[in-house]
Amino acid sequence: MTKTELNKFKEVLENKQAELTQVLRNRDGIAIEKSPDALDEVQNAAERELAIRNLDRESNLLRNVRGGLHRMAEGTFGVCLHCEEDISIKRLHAVPWAAYCIQCQEVADRNQEVGNDSLDDMLVHAA
């Protein structure tokens, strides 16, 4: 990967980190509001649950973005954390914070659907 490409990915990751940090500061959606109407209580609880799931998803994405920046600082950006093969440039353009090549990511995703927790265990059994 060229220095120019690396700098471009770094800029994308830093912009995404700033965006997510700003979004995660807004936690108004998880405030507990009391209402005398039971239907309103149910509606508020559903909205709060959705806001919590969104915060969780964005928090995980921020963690992945920071991981990408960390790998960049270490000099391992663009290398799969499991098989240590290069992650395709096409994948990095689509998902700049990708830590795994597409094959290892597919194995991890399939096993996550099944309920296996340890990524290393999943990938070892797949190999």
Image (cartoon, helix red, strand yellow):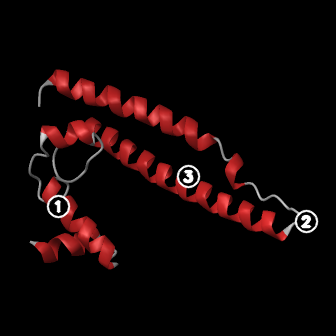
According to the picture, the residue beneath numbered tag 1 turns out to be 104
Q: Residue furthest top?
A: 4
Is residue 74 visible to the viewer in this orientation of the structure?
no
Q: Residue at x 24, y 70 (%)?
A: 110
Residue placed at 83% from the left, 70% from the top?
38
- At a point 49% along the width and 50% down the height, the residue shown is 59
Q: Kindly report which numbered mark, 3 or 2, lies closer to the viewer in this rendering.
A: 2
Secondary structure under tag 3 reads helix
User: Which residue is farthest front?
Assistant: 39
Answer with mark 3 or mark 2, whichever residue precedes in sequence. Answer: 2
Taking depth in this image into account, of 73 and 15 the one nearest to the observer is 15
Specify few, some or many for label 3: CA neighbours under 10 Å numbering under 14, 14-19, or 20 or more.
many
Q: Which residue is mark 3?
A: 55
Please state if 10 lies on the left or on the right of 102 as rendered: right
Q: Which residue is mark 2?
A: 36
Quarter of the C terminus within the rendering: bottom left
